[in-house]
Image (spheres, rainbow, N blue to C red):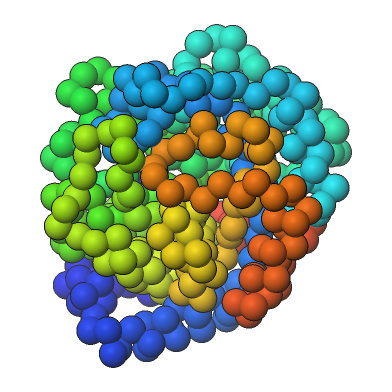
Amino acid sequence: MGMDKKELEALLTIPEEKMENLLFLAAKTKRETLGNVTYLRGLIELSNICRKNCLYCGIRCSNTNTPRYTLSDEEVFFAADYAFKNRYGSIAIQAGEQQSEPFISRIERLVDEIKERTGGALGITLSLGEQSRDTYRRWKEVGADRYLLRIETSNETLYHSLHPEDRNHRFADRIEALHNLKDLGYQLGCGVMIGLPGQSISDLANDLLFFKRLDIDMCGMGPFIEHADTHLKNPHLSLSARFDLTIRMIAILRILMPTINIAATTALQAIDPLGREKALRAGANVIMPNITPVNTRSAYKLYDNKPISEDCLDIQDKTLFERILAAGDEIGFDLQGNSKHFRDKQSV
Ligand code: 5AD
Ligand code: SF4
């Protein structure tokens, strides 16, 4: 459905009493285009080592309070096998940005081996930051299916206010990376943070139009949440207002791009324990349960209050699955859950 900027701004600021209508339309769109199925991606937080220094992020390289870790191959395979055996359909491997050749070839090897171990059946999403076109190509060749790279905000001036002014944090590089990923045939995921200091409703409407123009296949959006070790704060917007705006963004994006995959992100759950389920009701269709070994989870802390379950995976799954069902969805067991938007483009 096409919408212009004015219409998007109107929906982003729709009065509370009309929210139900927006949510109803988003839920109807999801049901009619995708069915009420939530896809699972087991999230493996491979390493919190990062070369970047984004002002909002708890694992930025200058934060010396964070102990750094990298999972062993055995830990990664254990997590991937868990996801496969428990019928997740897909995993997502995430880490801070590292560009060394040993890192690049390690990812290549891990993707290759996980595909091998699962007979190609387990879908693999990577979220490993900006890389050269050649690196993206190498990872694609061994079988990576999708890539998540958030633009964080499509407003270049705002982007620069959130990142150090140096060669490691160029807006143009981020845009180029997104185009390379798309060109190389990845299912492309993008996203923004919502409630950033200095971010306006006009910016958020532009973010939605940016996604549409880039023709993304997947989206992950979450509220900005302060981290105690970082200086970036937004005293002007409460956490609950950021939560509410995020739900609106999800609902509007579902209507704007009916067939893409939209994640119910963990940052929502940091504000409201039922945050992800509310996102599913507002049109999201993907959940990424954390399957990182429990002992390293607390070190991958991008923002405060990040939910860290210490339950064993079986119990974590049971609780989550019950909640997905309670939100009115089925669970996409054994389904890779590729983006319908992407599949439709392939078939023309
Ligand atoms: N609050 C919310 N999301 C954050 N991210 C990083 N720091 C924060 C924060 N303080 C998100 C960014 C990044 C993703 C990995 O985590 O959008 O792309
Ligand atoms: Fe690194 Fe990503 Fe955090 Fe930026 S947001 S510091 S790139 S992990």
Foreground pick, 259 / 130: 130
Dividing the image into four equal quarters, which quarter contains ligand 1? top left
Residue 230 in the figure: left or right of residue 236: right
Instruction: State the image coordinates of residue 17 (x, y, percent, origin top left).
Output: 28, 90
Q: Nearer the viewer, residue 338 or 89?
A: 89
| 48 to 14, vertically: above or below | above
Quarter of the image where one finds residue 104? top right
Q: Is residue 222 left or right of residue 331?
A: left
Q: How many marks?
A: 0
Q: Is residue 215 left or right of residue 208?
A: right
Placement of the C terminus among the 4 image quadrants: bottom right
Name the foreground residue: 195 vs 30.
195
Determine which quarter of the picture holds residue 331.
bottom right
What residue is shown at x 70% (from left), y 71% (from top)? 322
Q: Is residue 54 visible?
A: yes
Can residue 29 be seen in this snapshot? no
Q: Is residue 194 above or below residue 23?
A: above
Residue at image point 83% right, 31% down: 116
* Quarter-of-image position of residue 221: bottom left
Residue at the location (74% across, 37% down)? Answer: 79
Residue 250 on image: x %, y %:
40, 66
Side of 300 relative to 324 (left or right): left
The image shows residue 90, relative to residue 175, as above or below, that is below
Q: Residue 177 at what x, y percent from top left?
A: 39, 31
- Residue lying farthest top? 101
Which quadrant: the N terminus? bottom left
Residue drawn 17% across the image and 23% down it: 165
Relative image position of residue 67 (x, y in whole percent)? 49, 22
